[in-house]
Image (spheres, rainbow, N blue to C red):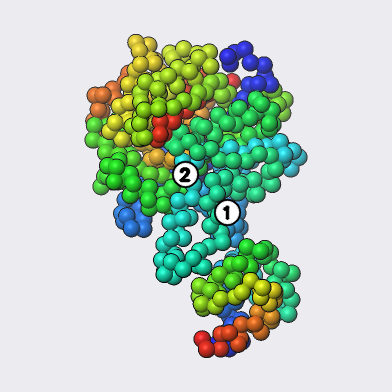
Amino acid sequence: MASERPDHQRIVITGVGLSAPNGNSLPEFRRALLEGRSGVKPFETRYFGHTAAGICDFDELRYQKRKEVRRGTRAGSLGIYCAREAIADSGLDWENVDRSAVGIFVGVTEHGNVETENEIYLIKGYDYDTRYWSHHHNPRTVANNPAGEISLSLGITGPHYTLGAACAAGNTGIIQGVQMLRLEECDFALCGGVSESIHSFGIFASFNSQGALAKHDDPTKASRPFDADRNGIVVAEGGCMFVLERYDSARARGAKIYGEIVGHAMNSDATDFVLPDSGRQAECIRLALRRAGMRPEEIDVVSTHATATVSGDVQECIALREVWGESGGRTLINNTKSFIGHAMGAAGALELAGNLPSFDDGVCHATINLDRLDEQCALPGLVANQPRQAGRINAILNNSFGMLGINAVVIVKRV
Amino acid sequence: MTADEIRKAILEILHDIAPDEDLGDLKDEVAFTEQLPLDSMDFLDIVMELRKRYRIQIPEEEYTQLSSMASTIKYLEPRMQDM
């Protein structure tokens, strides 16, 4: 249990690097969340046409040369940008860090679709003659590509891999970092998640065929979790990488500590390919709380997963009601997808990051685009449209749930 | 294509492959790898772009002919004379 862990087993966040559709650093991102600014814009994609998406505008050339951007993937570029920003933010004396003691654990929903779609599109112009298929295809599409590009960029020789966990991948990357540090398989963990998914037309087409792609005349209003008129998901790209380290080493070097990861849990619904299960979500939340040694009412902010699908939002609300029961009301509830859309592999990590500054400013950011609350999603503590000054915020619970019934919950406490 | 046109075509390909490099001082007689940061995947890019842009198929055993601008032009001139 968290309170009984020795300092060497306590894991803290000491650096954050991110690119969200509405901000390319944590301060920028936080400002946008407090000011209610969406990052969703009109977007057009091959074959599918006009839609809306969360689009990032970070400077790819800040840490990469043009050649490296061309050689690699968008997910790799996002990963490199976020990882390097996180390292810089951590204040680590990077030149003297043992690179073999750094691990890279990147959550992704999928990887390879963007490159494969591009290649198939190009080869059609050569009448499907496979001699025109790129030699870059394999290194671009291997599932570890985003983590591998970070390793190459930073000269990191510790372990690197991606974790495929659907829309729970951002939290899963963080959990892997925690575990690897506790196992002493690394001394620093660069972990989180990335998404390049908007550059695949297939993800839009598939959500659309499923009846789960959001439509709205105003892109900034398209992502509407908990709203009675919500009609689906806005796909987004993005990335968020944390530097995690053990509390004793962080304190010894006087690191700025964003928070401590005091509890986590993962489980599986084992019920349906796409529809979530509130009962299993509640179990996952309770397991994370038990591991944190906390009661539900001790959580100050719940960062919900809610993607604005009609059924998904309801299931999460049922789960939250089940766990918080009569003690709800004190715990505030928000949603970041309402601002930036669903950043897939990056979602859990970005949504946690956006809430971390609340430990300093005591404000819980809102869930926006909530014009008419769906009664099935009416939760006490739901912070609608405007941020709420909460006084002192000490603990954040971050939900992420994904297809094939994968659930991941992370709890972070102020240190 | 003339030798000059081939040189221009190769420079265009190199500019796409190595967009950060200044190709203005490229010496024709010196190997590409001694002047530019090119690795084996970049060489395959050159082969692929020649294939895509000019439908030239270069057998693997002849890749070494592309080591410098001069040797590349010498190799391609007879193969691209009708283009």
Q: In which quadrant of the rendered image does the N terminus of chain A lie?
A: top right
Q: Which residue is the site of mark 1? A: A139
Residue B3 x %, y % = 61, 87
Name the element at disc 1: helix
In this orientation, which residue lies closer to the viewer: A73 or A237? Answer: A73
Query: Is residue A214 in view?
Result: no
Q: Quick one: label 2, few (<14), some, or many (20+) residues within 10 Å?
A: many
Q: Looking at the image, which is closer to me, A400 or B61?
A: B61
What residue sits right under mark 2 in the picture?
A110
Callout 1 amino acid: Pro
Nearer the observer, A332 or A320: A320
Secondary element under disc 2, as helix, strand or loop, is loop
Q: CA distance from mark 1 to mark 2?
A: 15 Å
Vertical placement of residue B25 versus A300, above or below: below
The amino acid type of the residue labelled 2 equals Glu
x, y (%) of residue A32?
A: 43, 38
**Mark 1 closeness class: few <14, some 14–19, many ≥20 residues within 10 Å:** some
Residue farthest to the top?
A: A326
Query: Residue A150, labelled with which disc?
Result: none
Q: Residue A130 at what x, y percent from top left?
A: 49, 65
| Residue at 28% across, 33% down | A310
Residue A306 x %, y %: 36, 31
- Closer to the chain start, of discs 1 and 2, is 2
Image check: A278 left or right of A70?
A: left
Does the residue at mark 1 contact the one at mark 2 (Cβ under 8 Å)?
no
